[in-house]
Image (cartoon, rainbow, N blue to C red):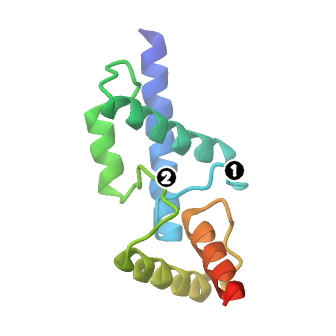
Amino acid sequence: FEWSIRTNEVWKTRYGELVSYATEFGNANVPQNFPQNPSLGRWVSRQRTRYKKFKNGNELCGITTYQIQLLNNIGFEWRINSTYSADSWDDRYNESVSYVEDFGHARVPQKSALGCWMEQQRKQYKKN
């Protein structure tokens, strides 16, 4: 029982770090190899894996419906797709504009959802 208490405390700690990340960066898409907090990046990846198991009916997946709700409340993306709808494209574009306004450059970490999107846009531009 001590183990589950410790696990719950770690989850709360990482969730708090994720909320801070979302506040700072405008999304909850922490890159898996996030240099400022590698543990957070790995934790986010584990949540996606656990959620996938949850959706497949695995009752011992390691994530609760309450935790899923908390993550949903901050805009957590369960699947990071490489294809986007028109609305998604506009959202990513607006996110990139905000990033440039906040950081003064468009060199977004490529491991993030926005970074992947921007890399795709650069490739498309070079093709045309």
The spot of residue 58 in percent (x, y) is 34, 22
Image quadrant holding the N terminus, namely top left
**Residue 105 seen in the figure:** no
The spot of residue 43 in percent (x, y) is 55, 40
Above-or-below relation of 29 to 107: above
Looking at the rendered structure, which numbered label has been put on residue 53? none
Q: Secondary structure at mark 1?
A: loop
Is 107 in front, or is 70? 107
| Neighbours of disc 1 within 10 Å: few (<14), some (14-19), many (20+) | some
The spot of residue 124 in percent (x, y) is 63, 82
Name the residue rendered at 41%, 78% in the picture.
Answer: 91
- Quadrant of the rendered image containing residue 77: bottom left
Above-or-below relation of 112 to 94: above
Judged by depth in the image, the label closer to the viewer, 2 or 1, is 1
The spot of residue 66 in percent (x, y) is 26, 37
| Neighbours of disc 2 within 10 Å: few (<14), some (14-19), many (20+) | many
Above-or-below relation of 37 to 123: above
**Separation of disc 2 and disc 1 at Cα?**
14 Å
Q: Amino acid at mark 2?
A: Leu
Q: Which residue is mark 2?
A: 18
- Quadrant of the rendered image containing residue 12: top left
Is 81 in front, or is 47? 81
Is 57 in front, or is 45? 57
Q: Amino acid at mark 1?
A: Asn
Q: Is residue 99 left or right of residue 57?
A: right
Q: Which residue is mark 1?
A: 33
Name the residue rendered at 43%, 17% in the picture.
Answer: 4
Q: Identify the mark nearer the N-term, 2 or 1.
A: 2
Q: Is residue 99 left or right of residue 125?
A: left
Image quadrant holding the C terminus, namely bottom right
